[in-house]
Amino acid sequence: MKQSHLKRNLFPIGMVLGLSACAAFGEFLMDDQATVIKVAEKYVSEWHADYDTTNTKLVIKDTGEYWRAYYELPEGMVGGSPVMIIDKRTKEVIRSFRTQ
């Protein structure tokens, strides 16, 4: 009887703790995403000033130790975009190139 009562009481606590961990993880991801966006936009404005980011979407891929950020062109548009490899530890662009 006591085990059953214990399990019933622990389940909601576990759910709350699990949801709290997910929320904290989500905030961590949002902070990282905001950092990558800021770094990428600044880099493009300084080093690829001729690139028009209007109507493009910044795509961020997590590759382990680095983030890969690039602009996705609208459907039907032909061309390329800057690609930035950003170090997660230093939050700096360590490599950049432009696709065609």
Image (tube, rainbow, N blue to C red):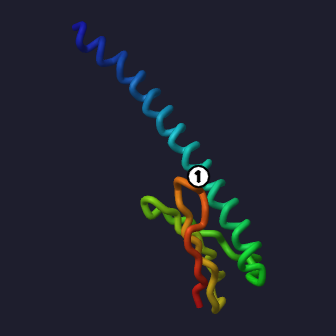
**Residue sitting at 58 percent across and 81 percent down?**
97
Point out residue 58 in the picture as x, y percentages from the top left corner.
Answer: 64, 69
Point out residue 20 in the picture as x, y percentages from the top left corner.
Answer: 50, 32
In the rendered image, the quadrant that contains the N terminus is top left
- The residue lying toward the viewer, choosing from 87 and 77, is 87
Q: Residues within 10 Å of mark 1 (few under 14, many from 20)?
A: some
How many marks do you count on the picture? 1
Residue 80, picture quadrant: bottom right
**Residue sitting at 53 percent across and 38 percent down?**
23
Q: Secondary structure at mark 1?
A: helix
**Residue sitting at 58 percent across and 52 percent down?**
32
Point out residue 10 in the picture as x, y percentages from the top left corner.
Answer: 35, 19
Q: Which residue is mark 1?
A: 32
**Vertical side of 37 occupied by 71: above or below:** below
- The residue lying toward the viewer, choosing from 65 and 61, is 65
Determine whether, in the image, residue 91 is placed left or right of residue 61.
right
Determine whether, in the image, residue 22 is placed left or right of residue 36.
left
**Vertical side of 68 occupied by 6: above or below:** above
Q: Amino acid at mark 1?
A: Asp
- The residue lying toward the viewer, choosing from 28 and 86, is 86
